[in-house]
């Protein structure tokens, strides 16, 4: 991100009823949002390290695979969510940046009403699909009924998040992404608490896992409404004022975002289905352990990229192209370097990490971990550029590209499993090829075309991260070979020390003076933006 001046008075933000998008405020919130993202990632990673082996121990690897497969179905429902609600935040944020709050509220009302219309008929449809799902999936013996309940509960929780999305628009406008992280932490605490309680009172079963998802989502729905009312009372939605014109405008963009989501479904949502049908539920469980960690890291990068999206929209609304281009390049540099540090340490410590996390019998999955994680240095590092598509409402071509790339990944994954006999490595290798084609090749070039500039500044911004990852992963891997780190205290202490040391070295050696100035001003103790 760049270091621009703001044309909006600081005093205009004192009243919480004025939800104006401010580039200066983005700097004020950057440290808080970034730190909260890091805290959430640490929380998410820590609880995964505990709960994944916990579920495998009580349910078995095959039943854990069914839990992961049910979660992958959520992406299908999210495709519908994106079509109806995905573009609303863009229009609300754009009008809030222009101080046209009445128009912003009309878009929000339209979104909420359309979401309720969509959800009402989906519940009975979901019930039928959950009932018949055992007819086409490979289910562990004796788990047919529990699987039906699991899938119904998990998918119902996904429907509830569609309403929650309406309330999170206010958080996005205010750039208070730390609140989203707090809500999600509450979601996970409620979910895990339900599992622990039911597992202690009843014979552990996968249907109890599904109920935990539903309890956590309900908590977030109620809490999200309360936070929205407190944060942006002037944007409070109502169940009236639906506008067909605004609905058409939102779904016109959202429809293409949904097309892109179909591509994401093919990228992330079919791996477990392919493995279930071709290799069986036990293989799904093994693959899902690493895939879950990969998705968690992609979620971190996506959340960090969301910090930049309101800034992209604000610059676009102000038609400040120079600052938008430099800001996107800076965002790519920050993102890719952050991913390089995390991924370099995780990949380098892959064998002791898997030994401590899942047990020595799963250490052989270290190659799968390398395949699924290492490419994210560049493929996730480029995600800030997605904000350019969103701000400019240029989502048709990316949507088509995502579907084409997803179909390529699907066909390649099936071929690698069936004909190349690569087993669970096949979908992972296919995913790497598809992500590189879409994120590393297509997206920088397309962003450059939108901004009428060369894509070289974006590629140049990623080069330091590639070097950092290669050096760090190699050194950490060598350390893991000569020192026994396969205990929790050694692994945790070493990982933390490596993270702190690597962050300090990257700050000193890989950031330029503008980057360092931004960080100094963004930190709570830094100088105020002038």
Image (cartoon, rainbow, N blue to C red):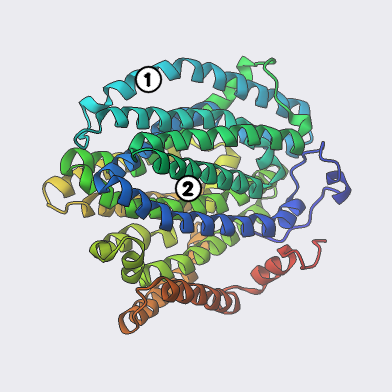
Nearer the observer, 386 or 15: 15
Quarter residue 522 falls in: bottom right
Left or right of residue 6: residue 74: left
Left or right of residue 449: residue 411: left
Nearer the observer, 379 or 178: 178
Eyeballing the image, is 490 above or below 38?
below
Percent position of residue 317, x then y = 70, 41
Residue that numbered label 2 is attached to: 446
Quarter residue 516 falls in: bottom right
Crowdedness near tag 2: few (<14), some (14–19) or many (≥20) residues, C-alpha within 10 Å: many
Nearer the observer, 15 or 125: 125
Count up the numbered dots: 2
**First in sequence: mark 2 vs mark 1:** 1
Q: Quadrant of the C terminus?
A: bottom right
SS at circle 1: helix
Eyeballing the image, is 352 above or below 35?
below
Percent position of residue 188, x then y = 51, 45
Residue beneath the point at 55% across and 75% down: 500
Residue beneath the point at 77% across and 68% down: 525
Q: Which mark is residue 127?
A: 1
Q: CA distance from mark 2 to mark 1?
A: 41 Å
Left or right of residue 29: residue 47: left
Crowdedness near tag 1: few (<14), some (14–19) or many (≥20) residues, C-alpha within 10 Å: some
Q: Quadrant of the N terminus?
A: bottom right
Nearer the observer, 102 or 135: 135
Percent position of residue 273, x then y = 26, 38
Q: State whether residue 507 appears in this view.
A: yes
């Amino acid at each position: 991100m760049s270091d621009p001046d703001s044309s909006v008075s600081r005093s205009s933000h004192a009243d919480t009823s004025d939800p104006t998008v401010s580039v200066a405020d983005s700097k004020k919130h950057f440290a808080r949002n970034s730190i909260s993202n890091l805290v959430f990632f640490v929380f998410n990673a820590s609880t995964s390290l505990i709960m994944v082996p916990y579920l495998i121990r009580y349910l078995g690897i095959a039943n854990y695979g069914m839990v992961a497969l049910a979660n992958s179905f959520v992406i299908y429902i999210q495709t519908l969510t994106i079509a109806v609600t995905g573009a609303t935040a863009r229009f609300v944020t754009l009008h809030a940046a222009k101080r046209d709050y009445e128009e912003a509220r009309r878009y929000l009302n339209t979104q909420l009403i359309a979401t309720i219309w969509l959800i009402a008929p989906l519940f009975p449809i979901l019930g039928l699909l959950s009932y018949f799902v055992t007819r086409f999936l490979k289910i562990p013996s004796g788990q047919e009924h529990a699987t039906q309940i699991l899938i119904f509960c998990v998918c119902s929780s996904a429907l509830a998040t569609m309403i929650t999305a309406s309330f999170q628009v206010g958080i996005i406008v205010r750039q208070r992404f730390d609140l989203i992280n707090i809500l999600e932490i509450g979601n996970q605490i409620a979910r895990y608490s339900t599992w622990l309680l039911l597992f202690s009172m009843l014979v552990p079963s996968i249907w109890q896992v599904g109920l935990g998802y539903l309890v956590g989502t309900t908590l977030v729905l109620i809490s999200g409404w309360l936070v929205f009312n407190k944060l942006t009372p002037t944007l409070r939605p109502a169940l009236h004022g639906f506008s067909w014109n605004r609905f058409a405008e939102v779904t016109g963009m959202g429809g293409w975002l949904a097309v892109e989501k179909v591509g994401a479904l093919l990228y992330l949502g079919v791996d477990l289905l392919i493995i279930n049908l071709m290799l069986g539920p036990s293989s799904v469980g093994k693959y899902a352990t690493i895939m879950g960690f990969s998705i968690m890291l992609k979620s971190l990068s996506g959340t960090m990229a969301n910090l930049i999206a309101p800034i992209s929209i604000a610059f676009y609304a102000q038609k400040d192209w120079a600052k938008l281009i430099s800001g996107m390049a800076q965002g790519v540099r920050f993102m890719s370097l952050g991913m390089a540090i995390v991924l370099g340490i995780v990949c380098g410590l892959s064998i002791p990490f898997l030994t401590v996390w899942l047990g020595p019998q799963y250490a052989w999955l270290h190659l799968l971990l390398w395949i699924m994680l290492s490419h994210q240095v560049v493929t996730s590092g480029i995600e800030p550029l997605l904000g350019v598509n969103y701000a400019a409402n240029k989502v048709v071509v990316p949507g088509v590209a995502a579907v084409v790339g997803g179909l390529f990944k699907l066909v390649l994954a099936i071929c690698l499993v069936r004909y190349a006999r690569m087993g669970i490595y096949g979908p992972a290798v296919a995913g790497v090829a598809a992500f590189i084609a879409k994120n590393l090749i297509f997206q920088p070039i397309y962003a450059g075309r939108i901004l009428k500039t060369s894509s070289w500044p974006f590629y140049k911004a990623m080069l330091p991260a590639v070097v950092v990852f290669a050096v760090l992963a190699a050194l950490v891997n060598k350390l893991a070979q000569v020192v026994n780190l396969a205990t929790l205290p050694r692994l945790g202490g070493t990982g933390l020390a490596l993270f702190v040391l690597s962050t300090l070295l990257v700050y000193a050696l890989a950031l330029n003076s503008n980057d360092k100035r931004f960080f100094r001003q963004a930190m709570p103790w830094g100088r105020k933006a002038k």
